C-alpha cells in the first residue's frame, strides 16, 4: 500500500512542509533518507523517530557503546506500515539533537499504488529548508531577520556565513524528486495479483479478512492456529512472511493488531 504523508517542521512560522507518497513497506531507516532529501537537510547529524514512547534510529559505526543507543531500536528493522497502521496516525522525526529540528509526520491517506508511478515521490511543499547549524527554529528566525535587514548588527556576518543570498520561499520540487530517484527504495510499483501471494498465503489472508468482518476485531495467532490446525511457530512464520511482503501490518507487542493491507477484491475464496 502507498502512504501519503505530510511532513511539517514543528514551530516554523510560516509553516515549512512537504507532502510525499511512499511505499508502506519501506523501513523507517529508508523513510529517514526520504525526509532528508525532500526537506533539504544534509544528513550530517543524528536523528530519531519517536512513535508513542518508542525511539528508532539508524545505527552508525561506533554508536553501539553510546548511552543514547540503550533505548533506541533499529530503524532498519521496522517498516512504516508497522508503526502507522491507519490514516490520521502522527509521529515525530527529530533531526540534529543540538538544534533540535522536530518534524510532525501525519498519515493523510493509505491507498493502492498507481501503476507505473515511481515511489517515493514528493507531491508538493512550501518554503526552503533552514540552513544546517543555524540554531534551531529560533536561530532560523534570527538568521532571517538579520539577513533581510541591512541595518541589523549581524547582517554582514550571516551574509558571509550563508555565502550570498538565501530565499526562504524557495522549494525546488523537481530537484527533490530527482534526488529521490537515487534511493535504493525508489521503484515502479507494479502489482500483479498472481505474484502477490501463494495459494497458502492467500488462505491465511482471506481468513484474517473474514474473521475481522465477523467479530469486529482481528484474529489472534491462536485463532489462526486452531483454524488451520498448525503449530504456533508455523503461524508466526507465516505472519512474518505476509508482513515482510507488505500484505499485512502488525503493531509490535500488541495482541490482535493484524491489519490487512489488501482490498477484498484481491483475496481468493476461503
Image (spheres, rainbow, N blue to C red):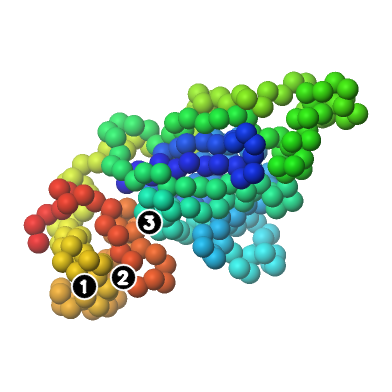
Indicate the quadrant where residue 20 lies.
top left
Q: Secondary structure at mark 1?
A: helix
What residue lies at 75% left-to-right and 30% top-to-bottom?
A: 144
> What residue appears at the point 52 percent right and 36 percent down from the top-left corner?
18
- SS type, badge 2: loop
Residue 241 in percent (x, y) is at 30, 61
Q: What whole-number distance in Å separates the C-alpha atoms at marks 3 and 1?
A: 21 Å
Which numbered disc covers residue 102?
A: none
Query: Can residue 230 be seen at all in this image of the molecule?
Result: yes
Query: What x and y, as percent, mark residue 133?
Result: 75, 41
- Mark 3 or mark 1, whichever is nearer to me: 3
Q: Is residue 50 left or right of residue 95?
A: left
Neighbourhood count class around disc 1 (C-alpha, 10 Å): few under 14, some 14–19, many 20 upward: some
Which residue shows up at 15% across the image and 73% down it?
228
Residue on which the image places disc 1:
224
Q: Which mark is residue 85?
A: 3
Q: Residue at x 37, y 50 (%)?
A: 87
Relative height, residue 172 to residue 83 (above, below): above
The foreground one among 167 and 270 is 167
Q: Position of residue 57 (x, y in %)?
A: 58, 57
Pointer 3 with pointer 1, Cβ within 8 A: no
Callout 2 environment at 10 Å: few (<14), some (14 to 19), or many (20+)?
some
Q: Along the horizontal axis of the image, is 254 left or right of 8?
A: left
Q: Is mark 1 in CB contact (under 8 Å) with mark 2? A: no
CA gap, disc 3 and disc 2: 13 Å
Residue at far front of view: 13
Quadrant housing the C terminus: bottom left
Q: Nearer the viewer, residue 34 or 9?
A: 9
Q: Position of residue 80 (x, y in %)?
A: 43, 52
- Residue tagged 2: 256
User: Does 219 sit above or below residue 77?
Assistant: below
Amino acid at each position: 500500500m502507498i502512504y501519503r504523508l505530510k511532513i511539517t517542521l514543528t514551530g516554523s512560522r510560516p509553516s515549512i512542509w512537504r507532502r510525499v507518497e511512499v511505499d508502506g513497506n519501506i523501513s523507517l531507516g529508508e523513510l529517514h533518507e526520504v525526509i532528508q532529501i525532500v526537506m533539504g537537510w544534509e544528513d550530517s547529524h543524528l536523528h530519531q523517530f519517536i512513535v508513542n514512547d518508542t525511539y528508532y534510529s539508524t545505527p552508525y559505526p561506533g554508536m553501539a557503546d553510546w548511552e543514547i543507543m540503550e533505548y533506541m531500536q533499529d530503524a532498519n528493522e521496522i517498516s512504516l506500515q508497522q508503526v502507522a497502521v491507519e490514516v490520521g496516525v502522527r509521529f515525530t522525526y527529530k533531526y540534529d539533537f543540538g538544534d533540535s529540528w522536530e518534524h510532525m509526520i501525519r498519515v493523510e491517506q493509505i491507498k493502492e499504488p498507481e501503476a507505473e508511478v515511481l515511489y517515493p515521490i514528493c507531491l508538493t511543499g512550501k518554503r526552503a529548508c533552514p540552513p544546517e547549524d543555524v540554531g534551531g527554529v529560533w536561530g532560523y528566525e534570527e538568521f532571517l531577520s538579520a539577513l533581510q535587514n541591512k541595518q541589523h548588527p549581524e547582517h554582514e556576518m550571516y551574509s558571509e556565513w550563508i555565502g550570498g543570498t538565501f530565499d526562504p520561499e524557495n522549494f525546488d520540487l523537481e530537484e527533490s524528486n530527482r534526488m529521490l530517484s537515487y534511493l535504493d527504495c525508489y521503484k515502479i510499483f507494479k502489482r500483479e495479483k498472481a505474484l502477490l501471494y501463494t495459494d497458502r498465503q492467500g488462505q491465511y489472508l482471506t481468513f484474517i479478512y473474514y474473521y475481522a468482518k465477523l467479530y469486529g476485531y482481528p484474529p489472534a495467532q491462536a485463532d489462526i492456529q486452531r483454524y488451520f490446525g498448525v503449530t504456533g511457530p508455523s503461524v508466526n512464520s507465516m505472519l512474518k512472511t505476509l508482513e515482510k511482503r507488505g500484505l499485512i501490518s502488525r503493531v509490535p507487542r500488541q495482541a490482535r493488531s493484524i491489519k490487512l493491507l489488501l482490498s477484498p477484491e484481491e483475496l481468493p475464496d476461503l
